Amino acid sequence: MATFNIRGKNIEVTPNLREYVEKRVGKIARYFEGIEEVFVLLAVEKGRHIVEVTAEIPRGGLVLRGQESTADMYSSIDLVVEKLERQIRKQKTKLERRFRGGGFKSELFAEEQKARNEQQHEDETGEYPVVKTKRFVVKPMDVQEAIMQMNLLNHNFFVFRDAQTENFCVVYKRNDGAYGLLESDN
C-alpha cells in the first residue's frame, strides 16, 4: 500500500480532508504494484482549490501526474482522480508492454473495456495516429514577437527560430495564464 505525502498551501489539511484524499487518490495506486509514495499538494489561490497529484512508479520508471482546480477542494480531488484514470486507460496497451513481467494490473480494466472502447483511436501497433500534417515557414523572431503571433492566431503554442541564436523554439500558454518557452540545444 502506498503512503501519502499530503501538503497544504494556504489550506489546513484536516483529518477528514486527508482521509478523503487517501480514499480517492488511493484508487490510482491499485493499478500498479510498487508505488511507495504518492505526493499530493492541496492549494488555495485566488479562490481556486488546486489539487496536484504525483506518483512515482519505480518499477517502470514512470511518473504519473495530474492537476485540477475548481471552486471546491473535494471536486478538485474527484476531477484529478478521473483525469489520472483516463490517462492510465488511454495508455493501457503501452503500460501492459512496459510492465510485461507484472506490476501493472490491467485486469482492472476488463469490465470497463467491454462497456466502452477508448482505444478506438489507437491502431493495433499501439502507435499514436497523426491525423493532420501542417507545413509552415519558421521565421526568425524574438520571444515577444512569437508570443504576439501566437495570440493573434489564437493558438496555445507557436514554433519559431530565435533571431539571436538561430535555435528552434516554442512558446506556449500555460494553464496559469503565463507563457513558457522551450528552446532547442542546437
Image: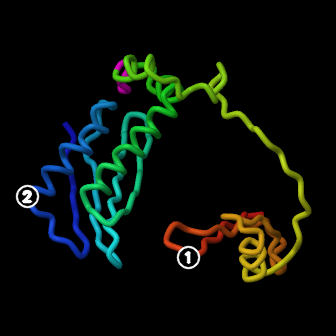
Q: Is residue 34 left or right of residue 160?
A: left
The three-letter amino acid code for the residue at tag 2 is Pro
Task: Kindly identify the residue that appears in the image at 38 percent across and 34 percent down.
Answer: 59
- Who is closer to the viewer here, 103 or 110? 110
Task: Kindly identify the residue that appears in the image at 77 percent across and 69 percent down.
Answer: 153
- Identify the element where label 1 is drawn: loop
Task: Kindly identify the residue that appears in the image at 41 percent across and 50 percent down.
Answer: 65
Residue under label 2 = 15
- Who is closer to the viewer here, 7 or 13? 13
- Identify the element where label 2 is drawn: helix
| Residue 23 sits above or below residue 125 on the image | below
Magenta span includes 146:
no
Magenta part of the chain: 102-107
- Neighbour tally class for label 1: few under 14, some 14-19, many 20 plus, Cα within 10 Å: few
**Number of marks in the image?**
2
Q: Quadrant of residue 86?
A: top left
Tell me residue 29's x, y (percent). Answer: 28, 37
Task: Kindly identify the residue that appears in the image at 22 percent across and 68 percent down.
Answer: 8
- Does the magenta stretch mainly form a helix, a strand or a loop? loop
Q: Is residue 138 left or right of residue 180?
A: right
Tell me residue 173's x, y (percent). Answer: 61, 69
| Residue 156 sits above or below residue 141 on the image | above
Tell me residue 68's x, y (percent). Answer: 39, 58
The colour scheme used here is rainbow
Q: Say the numbered circle drawn on residue 114.
A: none
Residue under label 1 = 178
Tell me residue 131's x, y (percent). Answer: 76, 38
Toward the left, the furthest residue is 15
The three-letter amino acid code for the residue at tag 1 is Ala
Quarter that holds the N terminus = top left
